[in-house]
Amino acid sequence: MKARVTVTLKNGVLDPQGKAIEGALRSLGITGIAGVRQGKFFEVEVDAADEASAEATVKAACDRLLANTVVENYRVEIAR
Amino acid sequence: MKAAIVVFPGSNRERDVARALRLAGAEVTTVWHTETELPAGTDLAVLPGGFSYGDYLRCGAIAGRAHAMDAVRAHAARGGLVLGICNGFQILCESGLLPGVLMRNVGRRFICHRQTLRVERADTAFTKAYAQNEVIDVCVAHGEGNYFADPETLARLEGEGRVAFRYCDAAGQLTVEANRNGSLNSIAGIYSDTRNVLGMMPHPENFVEGLVGGTDGRGLFESLAKAA
């Protein structure tokens, strides 16, 4: 089973990298972008019997390593 | 004083901190990150600066979950002293031994310069050789030193007197210019609730000999050497 994990910075947490990307887009002449927040994306291959246990495993991985929940949120999607 | 320096793949300041500790009179050994115990009689565990695991995932994230960190956690729980410098501070935050997180510098650049710090308290095992509010001249070298914690955690740190050092100007004033990485409340270092764990971004070990430009970092190692 495949899981997709998206880790993003929580609202209100300053994202200097996102700001830099925003500036670079502006300097490329790409208009109409109001803001950029940078995050991380993980593709995880899970060895699990069913979706529920796959999700539980990946959530544990997020809580313990993939995300720092002091400043980051995560979202887990199990690929069907 | 017996100090054990925990070395991870990518640590690179372990020899400097060993030299600083030895100059202060400490006995120093190094411990590889796969070890599950610190040497018997260890008084102080040190997490040195560097780029453990190439800063993969987040600075200090992978090192913070190494086997040796369980030993460091147990040592801290027994009241043992723990010092984390730069990447070591990031590892302490990632391992849960200290609260908060070190974010990318607000100016986005790696900063590497001399830095004056204000010593917030001189009654801990790390700072007895300094005076309270003394301004010391050391160095910083990091890309992710921007201290962040949620408002409740920050209020708790301040309320419990757990800020160890703050970035300041030469006169000891906490200016925006002196706080170049953008840390909340100009925080350069914090203690655990029992003040036996210290994490700090600046490098006191850079300035322990006049030949290299300063000696203000000595006080920290001398304090530690006398602490046990």
Image (tube, coloured by chain):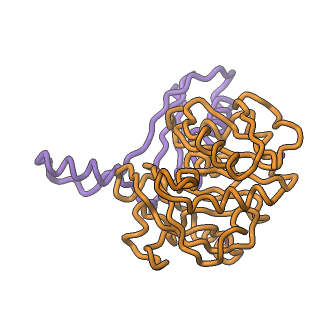
Could you tell me if residue B51 is visible in this image?
A: yes
Q: Nearer the viewer, residue B41 or B61?
A: B41
Tell me residue A17's x, y (percent): 35, 49
Q: Is residue B34 above or below residue B112?
A: above
Instruction: Report whether A25 appears left or right of B193.
Output: left
Q: Is residue A63 above or below residue B133?
A: above
Tell me residue A78's x, y (percent): 55, 31
Q: Which chain comes out purple in the rendered image?
A: A
Q: Residue furthest left?
A: A29
Tell me residue B31's x, y (percent): 73, 33
Instruction: Report whether B110 appears left or right of B132.
Output: left
Q: Residue at x 46, y 76 (%)?
A: B174
Could you tell me if residue A9 is visible in this image?
A: no
Q: Nearer the viewer, residue B213 or A60?
A: B213
Residue B3, by quadrant, is top right
Q: Residue furthest front?
A: B211
Q: Residue at x 46, y 50 (%)?
A: B144
Q: Is residue B15 above or below residue B144?
A: above
Q: Which chain comes out orange in the rendered image?
A: B
